[in-house]
Image (tube, rainbow, N blue to C red):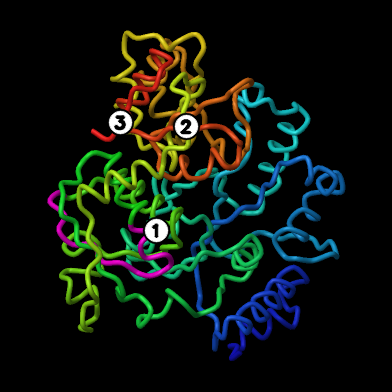
């Protein structure tokens, strides 16, 4: 791998032991990928504050050990300096204000807070969300990133036109210390053109329909790069994030193009870079019903738990949840958790949305989600969610039954205790 003089100096230890180990990790990683060089990045989003019982023994030795072992793949403990470039923490496992409802040991919650202080002082911004682009980390078109989290990566690549592969804890940690990442994959112009074509033959407008379309696309193209044509509506931010999250869950999609909507595809010809278009994969009424059915893992219509906000809700979604719950009361046998970034939760509180949700019996949670924390209210047997991503992962992770549907269907189930939703 070709290194610049500055990169060689980092590798040789001129900026300290942690930076040297980070550069060594990136060189080995890049060579394994076949990358010829590194590219500069000034935007890293990773997972640094891991508060789980298995990490507790590391944290007892100090958070330098946590970062060394989890983010540098180092058995030796090195002192972690301030990050070299802007870096943020993605979603975590604990809501430090609602940890008791999650069933978290108070000592583990205290460790989470201590970790946030440690990493924050080293330049890691505690955004604690899977949607950092909703709370201030908005990369520009063409900017090279080192981001983890499949739903964040697909949004950054596709909707914002930034450039990142799906990184891991180690490569993201090393990128934060060095401002470098291997130059390969979706960082390269030639790898960003579409190679599959989806033709949409039905109306797609409701958020649930965007989740269904995304889930179909991911299953149909796996890890390819689809262009989607035939859309009759320009989707909102939250519809695009649900589409992307679903496509990255049922498949491994990291980049999609929607001609006239996403920045790198003014037309279908632009999306394919002038290459011949492949045979289209059609998405119509039959495919929509089949996709909806594939997301249902429940038989029992008596629900115990409603999960909203995966990826984390936007402020517009929080407003809609509050509007639908206003004046209603959640069934006594049902728990409702609404997940949103903490920065948006503060806007929701000031706007009165949180008060309405809590008056109905719901809880607004931040920093985490059940699929990440693997924590549910006690006694849950049947889950309902408006997230195709959560419907894909949570039943398998938790060994519970799961329903997928629209926000309206989920709110109705929360109030009645019974799932009556269907593919409207």
Left or right position of 74 against 207: right
Question: Residue 231 colored magenta?
Answer: yes
Q: Counting residues from the N terminus, which is met first, the one under dot 1 or under dot 2?
A: 1
Left or right position of 24 against 180: right
**Looking at the image, which residue is at 68% across and 83% down?**
9
Look at mark 3 in the image and give the residue it sits on. 422
Look at mark 1 in the image and give the residue it sits on. 219
The percent coordinates of residue 346 (x first, y second) are: 44, 28
Left or right position of 283 against 358: left
Q: CA distance from mark 1 to mark 2?
A: 20 Å
Magenta range: 217-233
How many marks overall? 3
Left or right position of 61 against 1: right
Q: Counting residues from the N terminus, which is met first, the one under dot 1 or under dot 3?
A: 1
Q: Nearer the viewer, mark 1 or mark 2?
A: 2
**Looking at the image, which residue is at 32% across and 8% down?**
327
Tell me the quarter of the image containing the C terminus. Answer: top left
- Residue 313 sits in which quadrant? top left
The residue nearer to you, when weighing 190 against 388, is: 388
Where 358 falls versus 217 (above or below)? above
Question: Residue 329 colored magenta?
Answer: no
Quick one: label 1, few (<14), some, or many (20+) residues within 10 Å?
A: some
Quick one: label 2, few (<14), some, or many (20+) residues within 10 Å?
A: some
Look at mark 2 in the image and give the residue it sits on. 298
The percent coordinates of residue 304 (x first, y second) are: 51, 20
Q: Counting residues from the N terminus, which is met first, the one under dot 3 or under dot 2?
A: 2
């Amino acid at each position: 791998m070709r290194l610049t003089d500055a990169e060689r100096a980092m590798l040789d230890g001129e900026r300290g032991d942690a930076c040297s180990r980070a550069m060594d990790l990136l060189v080995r990683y890049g060579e394994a990928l076949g990358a010829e060089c590194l590219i500069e990045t000034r935007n890293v989003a990773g997972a640094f504050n891991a508060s789980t019982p298995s990490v507790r023994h590391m944290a007892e030795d100090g958070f330098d050990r946590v970062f060394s072992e989890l983010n540098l793949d180092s058995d030796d403990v090195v002192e972690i300096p301030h990050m070299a470039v802007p870096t943020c923490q993605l979603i975590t496992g604990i809501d430090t204000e609602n940890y008791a409802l999650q069933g978290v040991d108070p000592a583990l919650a205290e460790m989470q807070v201590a970790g946030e202080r440690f990493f924050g002082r080293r330049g890691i911004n505690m955004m604690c969300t899977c949607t950092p682009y909703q709370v201030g980390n908005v990369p520009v078109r063409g900017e090279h990133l080192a981001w983890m989290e499949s739903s964040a990566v697909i949004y950054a690549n596709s909707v914002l036109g930034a450039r990142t592969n799906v990184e891991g804890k180690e490569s993201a940690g090393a990128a934060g210390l060095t401002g470098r990442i291997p130059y390969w994959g979706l960082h390269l112009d030639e790898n960003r053109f579409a190679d599959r074509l989806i033709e949409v033959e039905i109306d797609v407008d409701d958020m649930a329909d965007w989740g269904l379309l995304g889930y179909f696309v991911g299953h149909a193209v796996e890890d390819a790069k689809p262009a989607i044509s035939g859309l009759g509506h320009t989707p909102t931010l939250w519809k695009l994030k649900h589409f992307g999250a679903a496509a990255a869950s049922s498949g491994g999609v990291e980049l999609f193009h929607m001609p006239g909507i996403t920045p790198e595809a003014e037309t279908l010809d632009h999306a394919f870079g002038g290459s011949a278009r492949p045979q289209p994969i059609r998405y119509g009424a039959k495919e929509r019903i089949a996709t909806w059915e594939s997301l249902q893992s429940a038989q029992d219509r008596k629900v115990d738990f409603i999960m909203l906000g995966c990826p984390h809700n936007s402020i517009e979604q929080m407003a809609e949840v509050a509007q639908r719950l206003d004046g209603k009361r959640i069934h006594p046998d049902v728990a409702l958790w609404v997940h949103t970034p903490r920065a948006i939760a503060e806007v929701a509180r000031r706007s009165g949305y949180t008060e309405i949700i809590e008056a109905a019996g719901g809880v607004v949670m931040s920093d985490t989600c059940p699929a990440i924390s693997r924590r549910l209210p006690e006694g849950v047997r049947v889950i309902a969610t408006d997230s195709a991503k959560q419907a894909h992962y949570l039943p398998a992770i938790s060994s519970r039954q799961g329903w997928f549907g629209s926000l309206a269907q989920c709110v109705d189930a929360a109030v009645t205790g019974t799932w009556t939703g269907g593919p409207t």
